[in-house]
Amino acid sequence: MTSKNILTNEILKYFLYLLPVFIIIGNAITNSTLFIVFLIYIYHCIKEKKFLYIESNEFKLFFILFLYLLFNSLLSGNFESILRSIGYLKFFIFVLVYKNFIETKKINLQKLGFVWLVIILLLGLDIVFQAMHGFNTLKFISAIKNRNSGFFMDELVAGAFLLSFVFNIYFLIFKKKNNLIMFFYLFFFLIVIFLTGERANFIKFIFIYFCIYIFIAKLNIKYSWTILIAPLIVFFLLNNISSFKERYLSSISFASKNNLSILNTYLTSEYGSHTISSLYILKDNLFFGVGTKNFRNSCDEYSTYVIEFQKKIVLNNGEVYPSGCATHPHQIYNELLSEHGLLGTFFFLFIFYKLLFKNFRKNKKINLNIVAFLYILTTFIPILPSGSFFSSLNSILFWINFLFYNIKLRRDE
């Protein structure tokens, strides 16, 4: 192995070790890291005089998806959308490079798990400190009393970050399940994510939490009590801490009426207004939408329609409602339908179906693959609010899990 190969391997190894820290620091350093990984890939392609990993199924599907994203953005005619689609290539290269890096055993996954564990434990303890004192260990005070972000400061995304890493880290470290260690580990982070006040991510965590106990841990009678403790503690917190009770149990509707149906309660909420905006945009851009990340530019012209629609629901013109505009529509299907239309959404979901389920039954999955797959499933839960799929943060969190879902390792590795 040449000195240059050793150097690039060391760079890739330490980039992966420190990736959670880069994500916490911010998008600029995360994107810079991904760009360097991309350059390393290009360097090795030039050296080998061929595109690396081109024979893999992932490369082919990534290339098709990249061409589609570029086509969609070109249709929109928006320069920012075109740049974002071109830049999205770095996430595909990240998966291809690190899939090879891990499968060729250039990194110790258990050591990686321990490094990441230290990082998320520090973040978790900082969030607990912030929830208890009103400010974190760096003296940052959240602008919203029932939202705690820890080291993420004014970015209220700590729950999304932890959801992406917590389950993978456990199975990176432990080759075999240990019911008591698993219980205390998952219980701590369940409470931490609850304290972030991120309702959707807390629901996703609960989903994966129970799936692990049902499909992986397979608790015997001796430890069956552990699955019930966490929900009981959460129930206690909801009933005894008013700020969190308000956050998790209050109505999401902006309407003053409290006898609305579940559907109308949703439609008169901030999330409902985004959905209505998305549907209006879809109606006028049926096949390919308005282009990646263009919801923010297109929703203004529909804001009056959204508000009038909501007023008709409660028959009260005195109510004040959100316009339905934001940087993104806060739900993956709203985002896909408004920005990619019916044909684009179908194509996008079809590619992901091929990525996720090709050879699914042929290759035996280890626990690490399974929990990563569960995370991916939560991304596609209907109705539940989410960040923008194509944002830098959500993209890197998603593709990290796709990487762990897709790597092929023996059960004893």
Image (cartoon, rainbow, N blue to C red):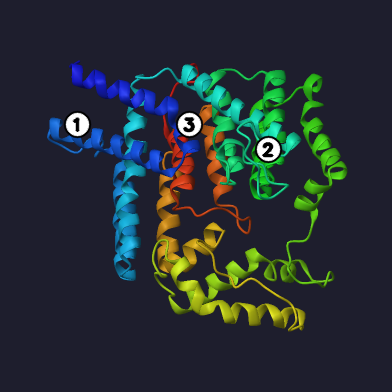
Q: Which is nearer the N-term, disc 3 or disc 2?
A: 3
Rendered location of residue 126, percent (x, y): 64, 31
Give the labeled residue for mark 2: 135
Q: Which is nearer the N-term, disc 3 or disc 1?
A: 3
Q: Are marks 2 and 1 in contact (CB under 8 Å)?
A: no
What residue do we see at 60% from left, 77% from top? 306
| 387 to 228, vertically: above or below | below
Give the labeled residue for mark 1: 44
Q: Residues within 10 Å of mark 1 (few under 14, many from 20)?
A: some
Q: Quadrant of residue 96?
A: top left
- The span from disc 2 to disc 1 (Cα, nearest Å) is 47 Å
In-front residue for pair 280/51: 280
Q: Is residue 55 left or right of residue 197?
A: left
Q: Residues within 10 Å of mark 3 (few under 14, many from 20)?
A: some
- The span from disc 3 to disc 1 (Cα, nearest Å) is 27 Å
Tell me the kind of residue under disc 3.
Val
Q: Which is nearer the N-term, disc 2 or disc 1?
A: 1
In this rendering, does residue 102 appear at all?
Answer: no
Give the labeled residue for mark 3: 21
Q: Is residue 111 left or right of residue 248?
A: left
Rendered location of residue 347, percent (x, y): 40, 60
- The span from disc 3 to disc 2 (Cα, nearest Å) is 20 Å
